[in-house]
Amino acid sequence: MTDNIDTLLTMIEIIEKYFPALSERQKEQYAALGTLYPEWNAKINVISRKDIDNLYEHHILHSLGIAKALRFTDGTTLVDVGTGGGFPGIPLAIMFPNCQFHLIDRIGKKVRVATEIANAIGLDNVTFRHAGIEEEKQKFDFAISRAVMPLPDLVKLVRKNISTQQRNAMANGLMCLKGGNLEAEIAPLRKRLLDFDLKDFFEEEFFETKKVLYVQI
């Protein structure tokens, strides 16, 4: 048991390294993810079994790349499109406890995992829906996602869900985590797109080709 606790403490150090101002509650919530995700993943596969050991670097810290691109102001509303097991929504909801997150996915069992994990850590600024984004009628300041579909397709789907009320330093829109060669995908949106290289924020090799893409809508 002591070894497990020591391992978890070591794992969350990667979060604290880049986000040193975390409260004790936030540290506890991030630490709890290290137990909850492997337990749930053994029942319902939401993370590749080969990659669960890289939970903090490849999934939690990767999700928090969006927090490096923009620090959301209190009261910001966000919809996580295709959240799967809760990425990037759950790590960001911990980081921004005064923002409201709505996590949506087509696969019910994945929504269940995300819901159970959020409930277990007392995350009270998230809601969930088992549906496609096409069915969602609510308005939000930002849509967020992690490599769900080609960017132009995602922009078309979320346009109806983006509010005209502005609260942040960047105009409302879509923030998407992507990797690899993206030139062809982003070409149609280049005039209203900003890209942030995560290698500029995180030193781990995993982030060498990872980006946050922001599209104003």
Image: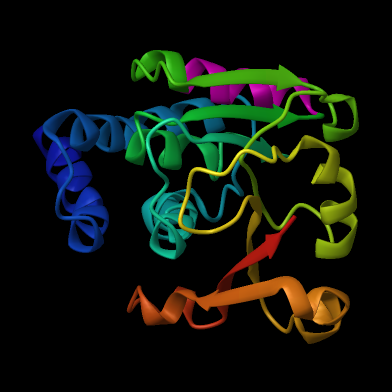
- Left or right of residue 5, residue 215 in this image: right
Image coordinates for residue 20, horizontal then vertical, percent: 15, 55
Residue 83 appears anywhere in the view: no
Residue 120's image quarter? top left
Q: How many numbered circles does the render carry?
A: 0
User: Percent x, y for residue 138?
Assistant: 75, 24
Name the spot of residue 17 as percent of width and height, x first: 19, 62
Q: Quadrant of the C terminus?
A: bottom right
Residue located 23% across and 34% down the image: 26
User: With 14 as the anchor, is 120 left or right in this view?
Assistant: right
Residue 5 covered by magenta stretch: no
Q: Nearer the viewer, residue 51 or 57?
A: 57
Query: For the magenta stretch, what is the residue range?
Result: 107-117
Is residue 151 shown above or below 63? below
Does 141 sit above or below residue 193? Answer: above
The N terminus, quarter of image: top left
Q: From where the camera sits, is residue 203 visible?
A: yes
- 81 or 84, which is in the foreground? 81
Residue for point 49% across, 83% down: 208
Residue lying at 39% horizontally and 20% vertically, measured from the top left? 123
Q: How is the image coloured?
A: rainbow
162 lies left or right of 144: right
Percent x, y of residue 83: 65, 38
- Determine the main secondary structure of the stretch shown in magenta: helix
Inspect the magenta stretch and tell me whether residue 115 lies in it.
Answer: yes
Placement of 17 over or under 21, stated as above or below: below
Q: Which of 11 and 173 is in front in this view?
A: 173
Horizontal side of 45 relative to 99 (left or right) equals right
Q: In which quarter of the image is residue 34?
A: top left
Compared to residue 13, the image places residue 195 above or below, namely: below
